Image: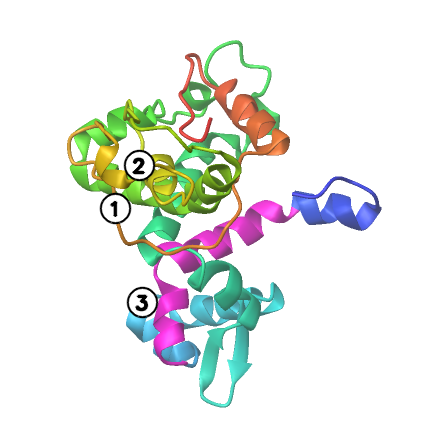
Amino acid sequence: MKKLNTREDVYELLSASTASAALGTAIETGLLWLLAEKPLDGAGVAQALNIPVKRCHYWLQYLQSLGILKETPHGYAPSSQARAVILDSFSMDSWKHLALDERERSAGVHDLALYISEPGSVWAAQGLAKPIDYVEKMRESPDRAREFTRMLYEVHKNLANELASRLDLAGVHRLMDLGGNSGVVSMALLRNPLASPPRSWISRTSALPGMRSPMKIHSRIESPITLQNLTRMRFLEGLTDYRMRCERF
């Protein structure tokens, strides 16, 4: 998210929640992947996703105005930018996990101006259920644990490869991975041409039930760990009456 420089930037930030919701819905419903397979007009999308026709038309037009979709003679299709930064970067499951996670995490901020002075949980003041810690969500759902692990692998793959390329591991014969994440860094280190033969390495990973390290996931994306993201997560954490764990930090 860019910083404020003009009045237009202020308006853009004020309206960002609407754009975020439209994009998140396009990801969670699988719209972008549906249209990547075959362009559809508004009526076709409405039927495929079971959305009221007029609402669907407005949604598609808004996504087009954001540069996410383009209109072709055969209907709507993902724009070249959307293909590059969404469809060709992460798998559909990983993007859906990220969109769902963000939607759940930000549910308590929409009427923040009315509740920011509450001494306790802003969520409770709005009658919302207490947000569940992401680790608890994975304990309750092995499927979510698997999705999280695969997403984490994709998000950190480029970062892991860059880290591995900067380390001189000549003469190193053993590696112990303490586990808990996707194992992406260990796998990148094992591919390091300066490392000892992989058979002499010990890789031990452990995670929550249902979490496995994926071996064949392809992605191209930078690490999302930035100062702005960190401060945003701390801000969201401060709206609850307990300390939330943040999986990205």
Residue 50, which numbered label?
none
How many residues crowd around disc 1 within 10 Å: few (fewer than 14), some, or many (20 or more)? some
Amino acid identity at mark 1: Pro
The residue that label 3 is drawn on is: 49
Which residue occupies 78% across, 40% down? 4
The residue that label 2 is drawn on is: 182
Residue 214, which numbered label?
1
Q: Is residue 54 left or right of residue 46?
A: right
Is residue 38 in the magenta section?
Answer: yes
Is residue 203 in the magenta section?
Answer: no
Tag 3 secondary structure: helix
Q: Nearer the viewer, residue 29 or 58?
A: 29
Residue 181 picture quarter:
top left
| Highlighted magenta segment, given as a residue range | 15-39
How many residues crowd around disc 3 within 10 Å: few (fewer than 14), some, or many (20 or more)? few
Which residue occupies 73% across, 47% down? 11
Q: Nearer the viewer, mark 3 or mark 1?
A: 1
